[in-house]
Image: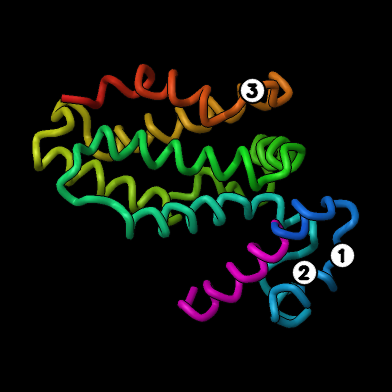
Amino acid sequence: MSKKGRDTKLKIVKAAWDLFYKQGYDDTTVEEIVEESGTSKGSFYHYFESKDALLGSLAYLFDEKYEELEKTLNPSADTFDTLIYLNQELFDMIDNKIDRDLISKLYSTQLVKRGERSLLDNDRFYYKFLKKLMTAGQERGDLTSDMSPNDMVRLYAMCERALICDWCLFNFNFSLKSYSKDLLPIMIYKIKK
């Protein structure tokens, strides 16, 4: 996908999720998404079969958050600490800007074998960025050399998904960010040198 196409798709995704948060999924129309995104109906249907197809696109908002955070990182900071920071910032966004029912719907769509499985798409910025971080962390000696960067990324991503899934199962009765602050360091401790 070209940069222009990626930007258009991201505008649609961002506008949709902003509207879903403000007025609810069921009360948001495709027309409102098109208007809010400043795109066209043709563009919408080029990237998405329907409004339901947007449920899997939440992963791209996570990518956008990671892209924003990448610009704020101290390149000499400890990689393990950087991973915890990234997680805390992402989970803060989820706690405060993502409709909880929609997060549940996203995860349920990912369990169905048909359709796009965005949470597992290795071409996403998320996976590429994490691999770059893990590789640099190994080169600096922050992270273990007992695992490949790909295996460390897989572990980190699995732990994030597990925490979100558990949060959904407990009906969001606690802050995801706080929950992760205590558990993620324990879950990914194996990658630390």
Question: CA–CA distance between discs 3 and 2?
Answer: 31 Å
Label placed on residue 29: 1
Helix, strand or loop: magenta stretch: helix
Badge 1 crowding class, 10 Å Cα cut-off, few under 14, some 14 to 19, many 20 or more, is some
**Residue at x-position 72% and y-position 62%:** 16
Residue 136, position in %: x, y?
Answer: 17, 46
Residue under the point 33% across and 37% down = 83
Snapshot colouring: rainbow
- Are dots 1 and 2 in contact, CB under 8 Å? yes
As for residue 9 lying within the magenta part, the answer is yes
- Do the numbered discs 3 and 2 sit on residues whose CB atoms are within 8 Å? no
In front of the other: 60 or 24: 24
Mark closer to the chain start, 3 or 2:
2
Q: Position of residue 130 (x, y in %)?
A: 33, 46
**Stretch of the chain drawn in magenta:** 1-17
Mark 3 or mark 2, whichever is nearer to me: 3
What is the x, y in percent for residue 156? 38, 32
Amino acid type, residue under disc 2 in the picture: Ile
Give, as a three-letter code, the residue at label 3. Answer: Phe
Q: Quick one: label 1 or label 3, which is nearer the N terminus?
A: 1
The spot of residue 144 in percent (x, y) is 16, 28
Q: Which residue is mark 2?
A: 33
The residues bearing labels 1 and 2 have C-alpha atoms spaced at a distance of 6 Å
Q: Regarding mark 3 in the picture, which secondary structure is present there?
A: loop
**169 left or right of 159 in image:** right
Report the front residue among 110 and 101: 101
Helix, strand or loop under label 1: loop
Does the magenta-highlighted stretch encompass residue 94?
no
Q: Which residue is mark 3?
A: 174
**Amino acid carrying mark 1 in the image:** Thr
| Quadrant in the rendering for residue 61 | bottom right
